[in-house]
Image: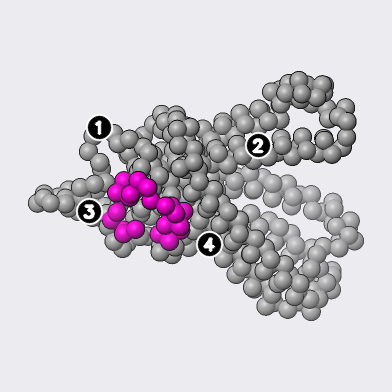
């Protein structure tokens, strides 16, 4: 897909949407490297309290390299009291960083969509940051909506509605599975319960991506209305909308599985002598995993744009992406005209 091609120009019957999305996202390495670097910075801040604590605890107390594979039971028993304050600090820091990671995700989504929608070549980094700031507050408003849907899914799957269903089907009281005829049946019920919640979780994530794609494609501001329209679109076209995202999910899972297998091999090479090479390779492998996740996340938004261009009806006003070219913050030249403006 060319850089100036909009999703609406794709053939309605185009196949392998997920593959096209992967190739387009792969062709913008500065973008997924920057997105991965932002996530890595958050992880670094999260690890800092533990790094300081381990540096103080391990200094001159343990044989160098003796704990490089794992923390021994003796170490955990000796340090259980001293690790308490560090654990509290880490939990507090993690809560704040989890919120920041959602904001970073909203920023990165705006950057990806800006790059995919513009009719320009080059300057991907500049357009990424411009799109991140342009759509940031619109996309942030999608976050509380997603959290509300997740809370509703959790209530349906684990609270009163599920307990009522178990009472009707198996005669349980308050969701207590001990009255079931066998442990295997109880395990299957729990698997079904967790599987349904996982399916709802994935559906809500897909809804969030398509909602952001709709907001960017139509250049509107109401996250609530875009979210309502997105649910209707998902209900009308479940296969067309969810199939490419599901395929990308399997691609991401395969990549992370390969990374996990390589990490296991590298961890097997760690020795008590404190060889730094496996540690360096583990660090690089972690960065590679972050890049892979950022790449696939960008592909998710490109796939959402492709599908939205086919199933989302255009608004009764001129397409803001159709008739001009030019970088953000600079001249916007109309296609087939003489006048120009400046993008803000």
Q: Are marks 4 and 2 in contact (CB under 8 Å)?
A: no
The disc placed on residue 325 is: 3
Say what secondary structure mark 2 lies in: helix
**Camera-side residue of 45 and 139:** 139
Q: Position of residue 27 (x, y in %)?
A: 40, 64
* Gap between marks 4 and 1 measured at Cα: 39 Å
As for residue 310 lying within the magenta part, the answer is: no
Q: Position of residue 292 (x, y in %)?
A: 54, 61
State which tag comes first along the sequence, 4 or 1.
4
* Gap between marks 1 and 3 measured at Cα: 22 Å
Q: Are marks 3 and 4 in contact (CB under 8 Å)?
A: no
The disc placed on residue 197 is: 2
- Which is in the foreground here, disc 1 or disc 3? 1
Q: Residue at x 37, y 60 (%)?
A: 125
As for residue 21 lying within the magenta part, the answer is: yes
Q: Which residues are magenta?
A: 1-25
Q: Position of residue 264 (x, y in %)?
A: 72, 67
State which tag comes first along the sequence, 1 or 3.
1
Say what secondary structure mark 3 lies in: strand
State which tag comes first along the sequence, 2 or 1.
2
* Gap between marks 2 and 1 measured at Cα: 38 Å
Q: Residue at x 58, y 42 (%)?
A: 202
Residue 315 position by quadrant: top left
**Camera-side residue of 106 and 80:** 106
The disc placed on residue 174 is: none
List the residue tagged with mark 4.
291
**Camera-side residue of 196 and 329:** 196
The disc placed on residue 316 is: 1
Q: Please state if 276 lies on the left or on the right of 335 as rendered.
A: right
Q: Please state if 57 lies on the left or on the right of 31 as rendered.
A: right
């Amino acid at each position: 897909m060319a850089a100036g091609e909009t999703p609406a120009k794709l053939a309605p019957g185009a196949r392998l949407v997920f593959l096209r999305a992967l190739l387009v996202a792969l062709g913008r390495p500065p973008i997924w490297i920057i997105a991965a670097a932002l996530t890595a910075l958050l992880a670094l801040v999260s690890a800092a309290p533990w790094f300081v604590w381990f540096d103080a605890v391990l200094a001159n107390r343990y044989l160098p390299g003796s704990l490089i594979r794992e923390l021994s039971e003796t170490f955990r028993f000796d340090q259980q009291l001293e690790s308490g304050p560090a654990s509290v600090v880490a939990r507090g820091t993690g809560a704040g960083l989890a919120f920041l990671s959602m904001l970073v995700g909203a920023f990165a989504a705006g950057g990806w969509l800006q790059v995919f929608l513009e009719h320009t070549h080059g300057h991907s980094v500049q357009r990424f940051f411009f799109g991140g700031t342009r759509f940031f507050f619109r996309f942030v408003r999608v976050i509380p909506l997603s959290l509300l849907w997740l809370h509703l899914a959790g209530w349906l799957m684990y609270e009163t509605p599920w307990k009522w269903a178990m009472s009707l089907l198996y005669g349980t009281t308050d969701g207590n599975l001990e009255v079931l005829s066998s442990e295997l049946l109880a395990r299957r019920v729990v698997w079904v319960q967790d599987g349904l919640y996982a399916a709802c979780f994935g559906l809500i994530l897909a809804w969030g991506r398509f909602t952001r794609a709709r907001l960017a494609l139509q250049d509107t501001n109401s996250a609530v209305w875009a979210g309502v329209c997105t649910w209707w679109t998902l209900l009308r076209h479940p296969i067309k909308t969810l199939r490419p995202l599901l395929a990308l999910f399997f691609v991401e899972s395969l990549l992370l599985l390969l990374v996990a297998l390589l990490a296991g091999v590298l961890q097997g090479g760690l020795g008590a002598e404190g060889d730094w090479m496996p540690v360096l390779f583990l660090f690089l492998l972690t960065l590679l995993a972050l890049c892979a996740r950022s790449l696939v996340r960008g592909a998710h938004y490109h796939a959402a744009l492709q599908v939205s261009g086919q199933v989302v009806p255009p608004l009764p006003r001129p397409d803001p992406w159709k008739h001009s070219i030019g970088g953000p913050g600079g001249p916007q030249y109309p296609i087939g005209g003489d006048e120009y403006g400046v993008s803000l």
